Amino acid sequence: MTRMNDEMVAWLKAQLYDDERAASAASPGPWDYNPTHEFRMPGSGPLEFVGGGIEPDFHGIAATGPADDPQSMADASHIARHDPTHVRHDVEAKRKIIERYGNSPVVRLLAAGYRDRPGYRAEWNL
């Protein structure tokens, strides 16, 4: 059982490293979504979008679809909520939980949050 838990912790740490690396490579935040602002591309109608940075360096991060479309608005809101700073804070907190609780059910619950990623094993479920 200990070997399986050690493998799970190592796998989880690798997922956190990947999250941190992706966040560090992304455009710096803060990312913002404001449904009253629209983005226009040549040849298209208004789009919902997520912007990043602080004026005068504010720039587009992602356009999610037609303006005022509920799904486009939900996607933009979700993207903005997971800006690089948020992801790095989340990774930091999870690393502290791993340090404190090691091979415990608490850490297995953290790993379960990544169960959609390659390498997750069903036997790690509680």
Image (cartoon, helix red, strand yellow):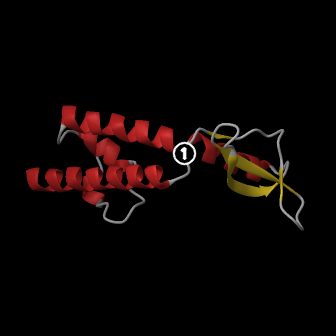
Residue furthest left as drawn: 2
Residue 124: percent from left, percent from top: 26, 53
Along the horizontal axis of the image, is 76 left or right of 92?
A: right
Question: Which amino acid does the dot numbered 1 rest on?
Answer: Pro
Tell me the residue at 79%/48% (across/down). Answer: 70
Taking the spot 42% from the left edge, 41% from the top edge, the residue there is 88
Using a 10 Å C-alpha cutoff, classify the residue at mark 1 as few (fewer than 14 neighbours), some (14 to 19) or many (20 or more): some
Q: Nearer the viewer, residue 101 or 23?
A: 23
Name the quadrant containing residue 44. bottom right
Secondary structure of the residue carrying tag 1 is loop
Q: Is residue 81 visible?
A: yes
Give how far across and how far down residue 29 sits, in percent.
57, 41
* Residue 105 placement, left or right of 27: left
Residue 114 visible in the displayed image: no
Which residue ends up furthest to the top in the rendered image?
100
Placement of 120 over or under 13, stated as above or below: below
Q: Is residue 64 above or below residue 81?
A: below
> Which sits in the foreground, 97 or 26?
26
In this picture, is 86 found above or below 63? above
Name the residue rendered at 27%, 34% in the picture: 97
At 65% from the left edge and 37% from the top edge, which residue is drawn?
Answer: 54
Point out residue 4 in the picture as x, y percentages from the top left corner: 15, 56
**Residue at image mark 1:** 28
- Where residue 62 appears, as percent x and y from the top left, is 68, 55
